[in-house]
Image (cartoon, grey):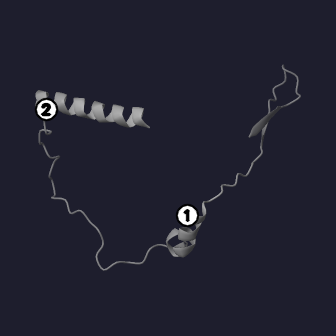
Amino acid sequence: MKTMHHSQFPKDSEFDMELFNTVSTETTQVIPEPVQHLLDKFSGVFAEPNQLPPRREREHAINLIAGAGPISVRPYLIHMHMKKRWSFVLVFFHNILVFSG
């Protein structure tokens, strides 16, 4: 939460000052017991990293061909009757999920 304080200088003064005071509020979240058990069991996985990961035998790389431009391939097009059919199926299942819950 921020509160703003204005200076008490006269309006025709060349001085203008705004001070911001930041007040932090801490919120605590209750972690369910099964989740806390997993966090404790795998604490090494969920620990904050304090160094870079170790070097690997094989580093990931994407080798590009020199001078190659972007790939020019038409996007996959679906026939209009199939698009209408899929749209109907998706709306049907969406309505089942929305109205049954």
Foreground of the two, 2 or 33: 33
The image quadrant of residue 32 is bottom right
Q: Give the vertical position of 85 relative to 37 (above or below).
A: above
Residue 68 left/right relative to 57? left
Number of other residues with Cα within 10 Å of mark 1, as a class: few under 14, some 14 to 19, many 20 or more: few
Asked if residue 17 lies left or right of residue 57, the reply is: right
**Residue furthest toward the front?**
100
Residue at (69% x, 55% y) in the render: 28
Q: Residue at x 17, y 30 (%)?
A: 85
Disc tally is: 2
Can the viewer see residue 47? no
The spot of residue 61 in percent (x, y) is 26, 66
Q: Which mark is residue 45?
A: none
Question: How far apart are labels 1 and 2 at the CA level?
Answer: 44 Å
Residue at 84 percent of width and 20 percent of height:
11
Residue 35's label in the rendered image is 1
Residue 57, given in percent of the width and then of the height, sits at 30, 80
Query: Does the CB distance between marks 1 and 2 fall below 8 Å?
Result: no
Task: Relative to 11, say whether 1 is above or below.
Answer: below
Residue 39 visible within the image: yes
Mark 1: which amino acid? Val
Amino acid identity at mark 2: Met
Q: Check disc 2 and report the residue beneath it.
A: 82
Q: Residues within 10 Å of mark 2 (few under 14, many from 20)?
A: few
